[in-house]
Amino acid sequence: SGQKPAAQKPIIDTTDPPDWFVQLPDPMLLVHGSGLSQARFSLHAKGVTLARTQLSPNGHWAFLWLKTTGAGAQTIHIAASGAQGSASLAWHLKPRTEPADAHRGFSPADLIYLVMTDRFARGNPPANPSNLDPSKPRGWHGGNFAGIEQHLDYLESLGVTALWTTPVADNGEMTDSYHGYAATNLYDTDHHFGTLDDYRLLSAALHAHGIKLIIDLVPNHIGVLHPWVADPPTPDWLHGTVARHTHSEGDFNNLIDPHAAPASWRKLTEGWFVDAMPDLNQENPLVAQYLIQNALWWVETAQIDAIRLDTFPYVGRSFWHEFHAALHKAYPHLTTVGRSEEHTSE
């Protein structure tokens, strides 16, 4: 119809990122709620200003660009006001957790050990044992962060100096997603593995044993049960929809050939990896900033040393340029490695 929804009281449910850190780039907040299409946003803060806002027509999403450069750590009060009332949120700008050079990266001198968290060890009773079924090859088997932490002496005895785990982000109700590659929330850990604090404790324990932590991030795609799939923040947030999308296929060599026609590689970067993993549109600068901030947030929040980037070839090269520029500016010693592959259909 093109008509704006009737004015209603603004409600704020979540904000991505859920918090931020001084000395990192000015953040873009993605706010989710309702009644936001005609809301006026304001901040109560010291030395932090709201540069601009962008609201979705359905009132479910708001983008807020904050200027935090030079500001100190503080609690910022964000308000959304409308004719029917207002909503407010306390949002924290935190001190840096470590010096930038504490994030050490890895080199050929390191012995890297890969752990699939769900299949390694169960360190404490599962929060919801009814979700676990070790008899299913693709089901959840119950490994968790505590299980890894309880085996650090074993890893150290092997000579391990860096631990890479499969992705830790929340995969929600994706029943076959024990591997972690179909996220439904990029700002929390999966409840099967433990809480965000549990992951931070694992990171601290690894560092106490002299072992670095490598996080596995997936900027290419999400899980089909992510809220964005049914309600995208912008119309072009994803490449296609559940009903209408292409699949990743083509010759990877065309991606690195400056003379290759875009048509020869577009399906690789815009097609869906599999039907259960919708492809993110990194050509949209809002999506790109969201994903870059997400990487910075994980590195700072969990004291990460390096990043393993899943499905690296399936993302356009201009995004990776911006991604690495931001990460290396914030963390000079951080290293990244991309998964290079030939695609196989499942």
Image (cartoon, rainbow, N blue to C red):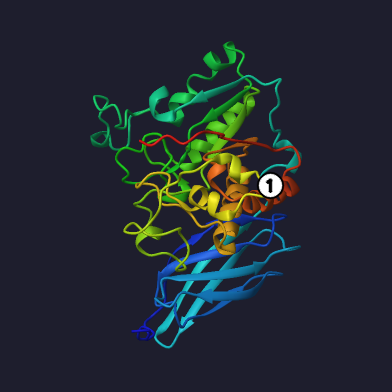
Residue 121 appears in the rendering: no
For residue 146, which quarter of the picture?
A: top left
Could you tell me residue 333's position as x and y percent? 74, 37
Indicate left or right for 70 with 244 as reference.
right
Tell me the crowding category of disc 1: few under 14, some 14 to 19, or many 20 or more residues within 10 angstroms, Cα based: some
Amino acid residing under circle 1 = His
Q: Is residue 331 left or right of residue 126?
A: right
Q: Position of residue 169 (x, y in %)?
A: 46, 43
Note whether 322 is above or below 143 in the view shown. Answer: below
Q: 243 or 33: which is nearer to us?
A: 243
Where is 333 relative to 142, above or below?
below
Q: Residue at x 57, y 59 (%)?
A: 283
Image quarter where the C terminus lies is top left
The number of numbered badges drawn on the structure is 1
Residue 24 is left or right of residue 216, and the answer is right
Please provide percent x and percent y for residue 342.
50, 34
Q: 49 or 343, which is in the foreground?
A: 343
Where, quadrant-wise, is the N terminus in this rendering?
A: bottom left
Position in image of residue 99 (x %, y %): 74, 42
Q: Is residue 337 positioned above or below 330 on the image? A: above
Q: Is residue 307 above or below residue 115?
A: below
In the picture of the structure, the residue carrying the numbered disc 1 is 324
Residue situated furthest bottom in the rendering: 83
Residue at position x 71%, y 26% in the image: 107
User: Toward the viewer: 208 or 274?
Assistant: 274
Q: Is residue 2 left or right of residue 113?
A: left
Q: Is residue 293 visible?
A: yes
